Image (cartoon, rainbow, N blue to C red):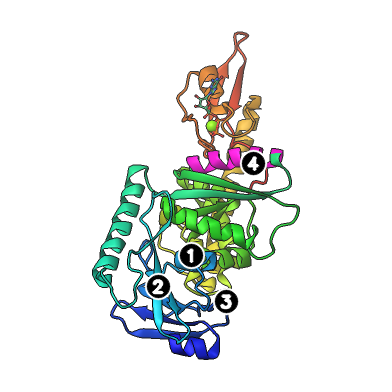
């Protein structure tokens, strides 16, 4: 490799698997090698790729930022820069590898710098390191509950960002996610493909790895193409705000028609996202903690989904017809109906409870109430009214 690099004046790289078999040979330019798509080597979440990169550096340059980004983004076992002298003989090397989560840095270097005198038993080293990464990531998830999330938003102004992030954070908490951090980018225009810039996204992947983050929650609604592009780029699970809200609804819905409405909304959200059929789908459609629409395991098939939408819509119509009859009966009683309305988590259910001495569910969560209740209240003047709790408001409700 060194001799050829000298002759061609180009970097040369190989990607070798754990057994040391060379899987790819890459001829680069003077500055870098471009790593091909590694689809053949599927990444098991939380583990390493099982491939290490060895490549020559022509002018004795240190491991570059691009090398480190490749290491982190592709989760390579390690990245080695190989140096050579004017005769094309190897005379130095530097190897960077990842570190388990919660270290101050995401990478470190091996002690071996002499290509002719290797002291580290590489295979043992990498197996042990991977084991540590896996167990530490698992432990991280156990300690704070599952579903570690990083919140991301692109905004026009700082004030905007603060307000929206606070709300998104509340939503995430209400969906049982552990918020491990927030990233707000200030920009007038969204990046068409990734919403935020690709440089920022790289930082986010590295940060996610260090903190054991599994979910990226975007405040900005994502188009199907954006969600797919980001999932492919980051290898993380991607959720946007509408999906987060639907997920909370799915958890909270108890009544029959509540459940139907939520499943309908989820299916309609899902449908346009099914056009690109590939493995990234599982990362987009699983819902949080694998709760997809409905309780049944989702069959990813457009036709089935359309059938189900039609079936659920029919059921819902029936329920609504029944409702109308009940409502007209109640109207005959001529009891005035008073509704308590307001932003979610404002205290509507608590107010209903104290007015009517009842015990409907009230909690410090967004959308605690999804199935509303009505209670009768008697005023001193012997006049009854019906007080109704409602589902809270939020801006841009899906
Ligand atoms: N400090 C204070 N807290 C209140 C008051 N009223 C309600 N809360 C608390 O606010 C939280 C939300 O109350 P809920 O009654 O569930 O609010 P909601 O408007 O029904 O919310 P959703 O059903 O989730 O949309 C609960 O933790 C309540 O204990 C109040 O007057 N003062
Ligand atoms: Mg309520």
- Magenta stretch in the rendered image: 159-174
For this orientation, the residue located farthest to the front is 86
Measure the C-alpha gap from mark 4 to mark 2: 48 Å
Image quarter for ligand 2 equals: top right
User: Compared to 351, does 133 lie above or below?
Assistant: below
Tell me residue 339's x, y (percent): 64, 29
Measure the C-alpha gap from mark 3 to mark 4: 42 Å
Q: Which residue is mark 1?
A: 68
Indicate if the residue with disc 4 has its beta carbon within 8 Å of ligand 1.
no
Q: Which residue is mark 4?
A: 164
Q: Is residue 319 visible?
A: no
Q: Choose mark 4 or mark 1, whichever is in front.
A: 1
- Specify the quadrant of the image occupied by residue 324: top right
Let me know if residue 112 is in the magenta part: no
Mark 2 surroundings: few (<14), some (14-19) or many (≥20) residues within 10 A? many
Q: Which residue is mark 3?
A: 31
């Amino acid at each position: 490799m060194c001799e050829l690099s000298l002759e061609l004046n180009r970097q040369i790289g190989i990607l070798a698997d754990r057994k040391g078999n060379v899987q790819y040979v890459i001829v680069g330019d003077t500055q870098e090698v471009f790593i091909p798509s590694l689809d053949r080597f599927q990444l098991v979440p939380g583990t390493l790729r099982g491939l290490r990169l060895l490549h020559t550096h022509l002018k004795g340059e240190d491991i570059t930022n691009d090398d480190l980004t490749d290491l982190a983004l592709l989760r390579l076992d390690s990245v080695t820069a190989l140096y050579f002298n004017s005769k094309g003989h190897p005379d130095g090397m530097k190897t960077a590898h990842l570190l388990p989560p919660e270290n101050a840095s995401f990478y470190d270097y091996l002690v071996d710098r002499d290509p002719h005198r290797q002291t580290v038993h590489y295979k043992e080293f990498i197996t042990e390191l991977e084991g540590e990464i896996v167990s530490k990531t698992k432990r991280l998830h156990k300690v704070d509950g599952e579903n570690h999330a990083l919140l991301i938003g692109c905004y026009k102004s700082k004030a905007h960002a603060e307000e929206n992030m606070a709300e998104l954070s509340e939503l995430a908490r209400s969906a049982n996610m552990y918020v491990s951090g927030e990233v707000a980018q200030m920009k007038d225009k969204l990046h068409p493909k990734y919403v935020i810039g690709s440089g920022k996204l790289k930082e986010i992947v590295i940060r996610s790895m260090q903190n054991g983050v599994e979910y990226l929650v975007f405040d900005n609604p994502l188009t199907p193409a954006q969600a797919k592009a980001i999932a492919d780029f980051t290898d993380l699970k991607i959720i946007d705000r509408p999906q987060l809200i639907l997920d909370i609804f799915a958890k909270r819905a108890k009544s029959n028609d509540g459940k139907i409405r939520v499943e309908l909304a989820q299916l309609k959200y899902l449908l346009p996202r099914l056009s690109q059929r590939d493995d990234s789908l599982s990362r987009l459609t699983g819902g949080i903690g694998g709760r997809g629409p409905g309780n049944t395991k989702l069959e990813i098939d457009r036709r089935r989904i359309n059938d189900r939408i039609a079936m659920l819509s029919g059921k819902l119509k029936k329920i609504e017809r029944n409702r109308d009859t009940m409502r007209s009966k109640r109207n005959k009683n001529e009891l005035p109906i008073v509704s308590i309305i307001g932003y979610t988590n404002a205290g509507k259910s608590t107010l209903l409870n104290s007015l009517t001495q009842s015990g409907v569910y009230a909690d410090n969560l967004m959308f605690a109430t999804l199935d509303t209740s009505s209670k009768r209240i008697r005023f001193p003047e012997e006049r009854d009214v019906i007080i109704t709790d409602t589902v809270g408001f939020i801006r841009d409700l899906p």
